Image: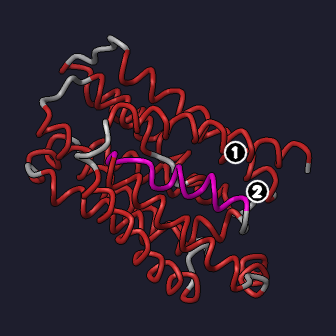
Amino acid sequence: MNVLGANLNMVSANVVVVVFLIMILAGFIKGTLGFGLPLVALSLLGNVIDIRLALALLTLPIVFSNFWLGVQGGNFGSALRRFWVVIVAVAIGIFLGSRVLVGLDSHVLMFVVGSSILVFTLADRFATSSGLIIRAHAERRWGAAVGIIAGLIGGVSATYGPPLVMYLTALHLPKDIYIASIGVIWFFASIALLIAFSTVHILTPHTATLSALSVIPVLIGMTIGRRVRGFIPQLLFRRLTLIALVALAANLLRRAWFA
């Protein structure tokens, strides 16, 4: 893509250092909380590089981190059999959403990403505190609907996770099944995201190389996050992270509006 290539040529050494540090921070959040890699990274990267370039850089770190989560969770096969409808729906939504992504103006895209982060961060509070219950007989219908919605938004912003978290929370799954389900759905969704971004030329050989290099700082951050997880009260850290995300999303919206 010409716009993406032009933005790559304008990236300075200082910006590279900032992007590296942002990736470490996003990986740290992911390693500590188990979520938040694209939310944190996009809200910060959008201030220093083009949003489309940020999405390209995040593609392989998202795949890697979700694979890591999947193999850690256990019960991979049983979760795959139970939630294959959700996975297919997410993949369809991602492919449709990625087609919209290439035609959006940069400031409109910034607005969409900022809005997604803000809405989903606030929705996370609802997901963890609501009494919403999805019964077994309606599980697949809800899964297909939520999967399409999550995929559509994920195809534009790479932030498909929060609607799926709300869905899985409403199922009231046992902890081990919940973790496995997140790992399976997120992993296959990230594979669909990689393929979709490749077909619309967001992920090119050049940006794919940079995305592969971005896995390194994310791995560093995740390793640190796993080590400090036991020393920081996780509920407090989660709340502070959500507050920070709201502020960062508001800044993206401000830039999109006043631009």
Identify the image quadrant of the N terminus: bottom right
Of the pair 40 and 181, the residue shown nearer to us: 40
Q: Residue 235: in sight, yes or no?
A: yes
> Which amino acid is tagged 1?
Val
Q: Secondary structure at mark 2?
A: loop
Q: Compared to 103, does 146 lie above or below? A: above
Of the pair 165 and 40, the residue shown nearer to us: 40
Task: Kindly identify the residue that appears in the image at 36 percent across and 71 percent down.
Answer: 220
x and y percentages locating residue 174 in the rendered image = 12, 30
Residue on which disc 1 sits? 112
Q: Secondary structure at mark 1?
A: helix
Range drawn in magenta: 33-47
Q: Compared to 152, does 66 lie above or below? A: below
Q: CA distance from mark 2 to mark 1?
A: 10 Å
Of the pair 89 and 10, the residue shown nearer to us: 10
Task: Kindly identify the residue that appears in the image at 69 percent across and 85 percent down.
Answer: 13
Residue on which disc 2 sits? 104
x and y percentages locating residue 31 in the rendered image = 32, 55
Q: Quadrant of residue 131?
A: top left
